[in-house]
Image (cartoon, rainbow, N blue to C red):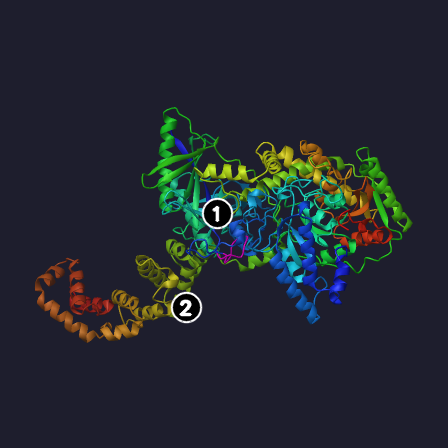
């Protein structure tokens, strides 16, 4: 049952092949069996079972929405009322959210059953899950290998078939990179497509929630539930949500695929280049045309990102001050001591590093040289994409320069860790939607194909990904020990 | 050396929106601590601000009233600093693109009109309150006020005396209430002010180094603080010292200013555009709508009162200073049909005096314009004299009875019957032969004695004009 997709589970539930309670119990059992993956921070068994019973009643009544009764889990960045919402940090280890994120409410309304909260890099800052206060989740494909980050728990759990789908968030690649490392499908929607309300902010102008699933078809179903304007999020887009499933089977004949030459330079692992080329060939067979495009400012994406994201996070994390919620140090001597020790003890190294970088970049005398300059680069990168989309429908390339690396391999050198996000970060700076789709293996480690779309063109992305999954079976591979 | 004082004011006025500037929580004053702070006001992880459109409308309204440039495009920025009553660790304010740009306001000091420039006015959220009392060694935090909308109005350094500064502050205070965008309640902190002060040798163009006096919430204290600070700076400068740029606190109990922090210790607020809020576009539609809603402004109203009602400048000024007062006055004129000057006197002197005495607002007046109109009509038709009217007014103040009822009940009707008045006068003339002789021998002043005696004998009810007339006849020289 656990290898089934959301679509298949929905059919099974609606036709009464099994109950939501059975499904829920079965997935809960698997999660506990594979606890060593460390993909979950919290399990909410009792709530899940109660919700599954309700779902079964709705299913029996015959008017249940499509996703009713299907288990899933949220990245621990989404606030869930009455449940610990840690954001992977000691700072919020004691934080029981008193409200639901809009995304959480929407999945509840859609009838999905949340089984718990998924592991992640602390405050979504990291590319390997290793910055989590709860320890890194494991990549189910290879021992002692990172699942990627920051949505590493989500990717590991879906890849190991502990849940059929999960939410993730993507600020610089945090959905796509772990999806690629774990061989699943991940979609980062257009900035503003999914409400950020209740999603603990890392870098507000870049953060975007999205689905992580086995298939593009499932991603379409989950995005359908997540997307839409939210009056509680001023940056959410007042734009109609199309039926993402309706166009999945559109023909790709004449599809123009842009390949930026900067995505295929010497920094790309040669096996990775070969895997991507094989994937592109599949598209050619389906009638797509290849167009060479250029992203001259791509190399500036990482430096610009590592000014903007830390700048925003330095302010976003100031509310974690030990005064109203979260970690508070023991016996503070005075106000300053309360701040310094609460934050010093509550935050991990990577979070501190980014707060310091961001604080520096915003300081008087440096603001123009860093923050303003980075915003200019951001505009240039956006223009590169806008220009490319004048002649192409989608842009393709790798998600990462190489497959999943070993635990501990890059922790000593943060710059090396940052550089691994070269292909994903530019997309966030431009606010575009993009997907990671399983596209093969290198040494038994999954490879992701990145598909980037124009603004609010998620339907096209899902169509392009789904058609690929009709002619390949990479997405159906299950890691050894999890079949 | 002759010194010139240079003053600029930053006025913070709370806007009277029903809900907070970025959340749906109520802004009502005086609720139990922390009961009007929602998840957004508490700065919980994950919450987002949503701009209150009414606050924008109010800011635009203010901008239009001071003839200011209204931004097409306005941006909210984060002002970063740590303080326990600042829940997010930053205040959402505005830096580079304030909603209201350059404008101006005219003040009148000692009969001279002076134009004061307004540099800008921007929207921001208020912080909560730290409660240092009653928490033995700890500090309590009340976040009811957190997120209340503030309009910060920054003036040019155009004022040259405490008098001008207070006149400007009063004018802004009057205006925000006039526009109905703030209750202006200074006790509740709805209207407070930072004062920037520097001195320069008279004739010098370059500004001296300034000190900023923070958070003063009364006109009296602003005036006293300026006097005190000017003296302090003068003393330093005259003894060859230099003024340090710093933030100071005015202590009204000791009547002194004290240093809070110097420029070197000042926070680097690291302003940057708030990525949670989109830029605000002030559309032509919104401008047109606000313009249509704009009330007649004090200056225009005053001019109209001068022309339409032929009032004295002071009276027109006073009545036009508050919409409620002006409306009361105009309703009174219309309803009573009496001379505008008389109506103006009654509103400005008797009514305002009585209201002030009990600290009441015109809207809380126990005597509405209709009741007062009847009283004025009774003066006009000679039923009572102006003097008796004051007595009736007092009675009306503490009862719901009409003027007529009180006049009737207390027998205050004026004696206009010349026969009755003659009888009284005859008796007075007979009783006071000495005064009669004095008057007849040319002492005009003594005439007043006879008027007084007559009024006294009639208990004030004799019609003064009639009394005069009859006395003139009886005492013909």
Give the image location of residue B298, x and y in percent: 45, 55
Does the image show residue A283? yes
Cα gap from disc 2 to disc 1, whole angstroms: 47 Å
- Identify the residue at horizontal 76%, vertical 64% (top origin): A12
Q: Dot 1 falls on which chain?
A: B
Question: Residue B94 is drawn in which quadrant?
Answer: top right
Give the image location of residue B38, x and y in percent: 51, 54
Give the image location of residue B221, x and y in percent: 36, 43
Does the image show residue A187? no
Residue B127, which numbered label?
A: 1
Marks 2 and 1 belong to one chain: yes
Q: How many marks?
A: 2
Q: Name the element at disc 1.
A: loop
| Contact between labelled residues 1 and 2, with CB atoms less than 8 Å apart | no
Tell whether A258 sits left or right of A29: right
Residue B334, which numbered label?
A: 2
Question: Residue A180 is drawn in which quadrant?
Answer: top right
Front in this rendered view, residue B244 or A66: A66
Front in this rendered view, residue B377 or A223: A223
Front in this rendered view, residue A97 or B470: A97
Residue B62, which numbered label?
A: none
Q: Quadrant of the N terminus of chain A?
A: bottom right
Q: Dot 2 falls on which chain?
A: B
Tell whether A390 sits left or right of B299: right
């Amino acid at each position: 049952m656990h290898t089934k997709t959301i679509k298949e589970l929905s059919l099974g539930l609606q036709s009464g092949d099994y109950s939501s309670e059975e499904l829920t119990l079965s997935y809960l059992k698997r999660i506990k069996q594979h606890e060593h993956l460390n993909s979950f921070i919290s399990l909410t068994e009792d709530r899940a079972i109660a919700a599954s019973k309700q779902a079964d009643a709705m299913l029996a009544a015959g008017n249940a929405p499509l996703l009713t009764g299907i288990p899933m889990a949220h990245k621990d960045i989404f606030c869930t009322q009455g449940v610990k919402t840690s954001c992977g940090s000691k700072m919020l280890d004691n934080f029981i959210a008193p409200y639901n994120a809009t995304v959480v409410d929407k999945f509840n309304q859609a009838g999905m059953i949340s089984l718990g909260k998924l592991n992640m890099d602390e405050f979504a800052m990291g590319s390997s899950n290793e910055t989590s206060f709860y320890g890194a989740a494991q990549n189910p494909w290879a021992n002692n290998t990172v699942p990627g980050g920051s949505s590493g728990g989500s990717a590991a759990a879906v890849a190991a078939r502990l849940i059929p789908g999960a939410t993730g968030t993507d600020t610089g690649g945090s959905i796509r990179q772990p999806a690629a490392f774990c061989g699943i499908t991940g979609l980062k929607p257009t900035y503003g497509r999914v409400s950020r309300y209740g999603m603990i902010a890392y870098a507000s102008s870049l953060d975007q929630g999205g689905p992580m699933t086995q298939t593009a078809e499932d991603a379409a179903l989950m995005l359908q539930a997540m997307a839409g304007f939210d009056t509680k999020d001023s940056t959410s887009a007042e734009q109609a949500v199309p039926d993402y499933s309706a166009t999945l089977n559109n023909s790709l004949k004449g599809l123009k695929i842009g390949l930026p030459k900067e995505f295929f330079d010497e920094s790309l692992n040669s096996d990775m280049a070969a895997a991507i080329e094989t994937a592109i060939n599949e598209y050619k067979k389906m009638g797509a045309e290849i167009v060479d495009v250029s992203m001259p400012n791509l190399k500036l994406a990482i430096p610009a990102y590592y000014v903007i994201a830390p700048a925003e996070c330095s302010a976003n994390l100031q509310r974690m001050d030990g005064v109203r919620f979260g970690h508070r140090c023991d016996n503070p001597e005075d106000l300053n001591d309360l701040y310094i020790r609460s934050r010093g003890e509550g935050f991990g190294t990577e979070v501190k590093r980014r707060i310091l970088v961001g604080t520096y970049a915003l300081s008087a005398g440096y603001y123009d040289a860093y923050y303003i300059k980075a915003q200019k680069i951001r505009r240039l990168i956006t223009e590169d994409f806008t220009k490319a989309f004048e002649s192409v429908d989608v842009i393709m390339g790798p998600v990462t320069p190489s497959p999943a690396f070993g635990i501990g391999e890059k922790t000593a050198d943060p710059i090396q860790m940052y550089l691994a996000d070269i292909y994903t970060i530019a997309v966030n700076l431009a606010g575009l939607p993009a997907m990671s789709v399983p596209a093969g293996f290198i040494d038994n480690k999954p490879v992701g194909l990145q598909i980037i779309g124009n603004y609010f063109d998620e339907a096209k992305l899902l169509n392009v990904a789904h058609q690929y999954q009709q002619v390949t079976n990479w997405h159906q591979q299950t890691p050894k020990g999890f079949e | 050396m002759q010194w010139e004082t240079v003053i600029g004011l930053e006025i913070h006025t709370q806007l009277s929106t029903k809900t907070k500037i970025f959340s749906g929580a109520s802004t009502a004053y005086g609720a139990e601590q922390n009961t009007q702070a929602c998840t957004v006001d508490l700065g919980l992880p994950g919450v987002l601000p949503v701009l209150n459109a009414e606050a924008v409308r109010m800011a635009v309204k203010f901008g239009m009233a001071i003839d200011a440039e209204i931004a097409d495009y306005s941006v909210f920025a984060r002002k970063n600093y740590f303080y326990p009553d600042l829940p997010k660790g930053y205040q959402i304010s505005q830096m580079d693109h304030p909603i209201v740009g350059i404008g101006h306001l005219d003040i009148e000091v000692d009969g001279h009109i002076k134009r004061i420039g307004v540099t800008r006015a921007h929207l921001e959220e208020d912080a909560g309150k730290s409660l240092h009392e009653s928490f033995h060694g700890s500090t309590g935090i009340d976040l009811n006020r957190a997120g209340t909308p503030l309009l910060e109005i920054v003036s040019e350094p155009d004022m040259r005396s405490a008098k001008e500064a207070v006149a400007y502050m009063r004018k802004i205070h009057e205006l925000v209430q006039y526009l109905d965008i703030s209750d202006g309640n200074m006790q509740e902190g709805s209207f407070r002010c930072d004062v920037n002060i520097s001195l320069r040798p008279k004739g010098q163009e370059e500004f001296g180094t300034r000190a900023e006096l923070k958070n003063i919430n009364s006109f009296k204290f602003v005036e006293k603080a300026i006097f005190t600070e000017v003296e302090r700076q003068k003393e330093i400068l005259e003894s060859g010292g230099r003024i340090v740029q710093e933030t100071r606190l005015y202590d009204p109990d000791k009547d002194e200013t004290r240093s809070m922090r110097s420029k070197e210790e000042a926070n680097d607020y690291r302003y940057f555009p708030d990525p949670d809020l989109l830029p605000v576009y002030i559309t032509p539609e919104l401008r047109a709508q606000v313009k249509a809603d704009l009330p007649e402004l004090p200056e225009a109203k005053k001019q109209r009162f001068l022309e339409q009602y032929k009032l004295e400048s002071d009276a027109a000024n006073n009545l036009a200073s508050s919409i409620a007062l002006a409306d009361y006055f105009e309703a009174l004129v219309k309803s009573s049909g009496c001379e505008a000057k008389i109506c103006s006197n009654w509103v400005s002197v008797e009514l305002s005096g009585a209201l002030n005495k009990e600290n009441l607002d015109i809207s809380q007046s126990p005597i509405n314009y209709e009741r007062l109109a009847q009283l004025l009509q009774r003066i006009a038709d000679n039923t009572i004299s102006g003097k008796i009217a004051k007595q009736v007014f007092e009675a009306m103040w503490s009862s719901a009875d009409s003027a007529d009822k009180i006049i009737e009940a207390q027998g205050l009707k004026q004696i206009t019957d010349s026969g009755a008045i003659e009888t009284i006068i005859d008796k007075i003339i007979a009783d006071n032969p000495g005064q009669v002789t004095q008057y007849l021998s040319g002492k005009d002043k003594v005439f007043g004695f006879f008027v007084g005696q007559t009024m006294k004998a009639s208990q004030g009810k004799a019609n003064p004009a009639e009394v005069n007339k009859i006395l003139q006849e009886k005492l013909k020289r």
